[in-house]
Image (cartoon, rainbow, N blue to C red):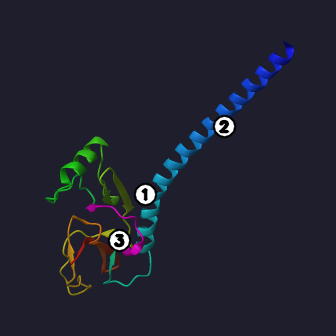
Amino acid sequence: MLNLLKSNRKTRTSSVAHFSRSKFTLYAFIMLYFLVGCNAQNNNKLLIERYLYSDAEVGTVMKLSSLGVEPVETVCSLQPYQDAVNYDHPERLRINEYLRKIYYTPSEAFWVLVMVTETTIELLKFARSKSADFGSFPMRNSLYPQPPGNFETSECVSYEQAALFKTQLEDRVYFMFGRTK
């Protein structure tokens, strides 16, 4: 009888240990999933910031796909003070509903790229500065480079066409968002 009790204790102990290992493994996989998901967003932001603060020549157009940004379906821009997508794009209602749901508040301090997939919407916020400001309007002036003919400003574009154009006015560098034709 004593031997039977000892063997039950061993079985119970090992099943508890097995349960704890299984639980630990489950938690580890859940944490890894969230880390990878968050990491993709942070990685996209870092790749774009690397370009924004690089020594890329004024007057260049850089496609987001060329920067190594993870593919999404649609990319939209929100300029400072802009609280919704205005451009008549198929994803506009979904994006604007998401912005309302998260109580998005625009600010003078940053501009945003909205990355849209079939199931997710992510906001990549970029601080405005003298070396990386956002120009959302066609800046017509002979004092600084104009966008080349293959670039057109737009608020929402497909990932394959999404690009940033680097220009400068006096001592401030601007990035215009749009599409390559």
The quarter of the picture where residue 13 lies is top right
**Residue 56 is a magenta residue:** no
Q: Residue flagged by tag 2: what amino acid is it? A: Arg
**Residue 2 position within the rendered picture, expressed as x and y whole percent measured from the top left:** 86, 14
Residue 21, which numbered label? 2
Q: Residue flagged by tag 3: what amino acid is it? A: Leu
Q: Residue at x 40, y 64 (%)?
A: 70
Q: Pointer 2: residues within 10 angstroms few (<14), some, or many (20+)?
A: few
Q: Pointer 1: residues within 10 angstroms few (<14), some, or many (20+)?
A: some
Residue 41, which numbered label? 1
Q: Residue at x 35, y 55 (%)?
A: 123
Q: Which residue in the rendered view is the most extreme toward the right? A: 2
> Is residue 169 visible to the viewer in this orientation of the structure?
no
Q: Residue at x 84, y 12 (%)?
A: 1
Helix, strand or loop at mark 3? helix
**Residue 8 position within the rendered picture, expressed as x and y whole percent measured from the top left:** 76, 20
Contact, mark 2 vs mark 3 (Cβ under 8 Å): no
Of tags 2 and 3, the one toward the viewer is 2
Give the residues drawn in magenta, as a range. 64-79
The quarter of the picture where residue 31 lies is top right
Between the C-alphas of marks 2 and 3, the distance is 42 Å
Helix, strand or loop at mark 1? helix
Between the C-alphas of marks 1 and 2, the distance is 30 Å
Q: How many marks?
A: 3
Which residue in the structure is indicated by mark 3? 64
Examine the rendered structure and indicate whether residue 41 appears above or below residue 180.
Answer: above
Classify the position of the C terminus by image quarter.
Answer: bottom left
> Is residue 13 visible to the viewer in this orientation of the structure?
yes
Mark nearer the N terminus (1 vs 3): 1
Residue 149, which numbered label? none
**Residue 44 position within the rendered picture, expressed as x and y whole percent measured from the top left:** 42, 63
Between the C-alphas of marks 1 and 3, the distance is 14 Å
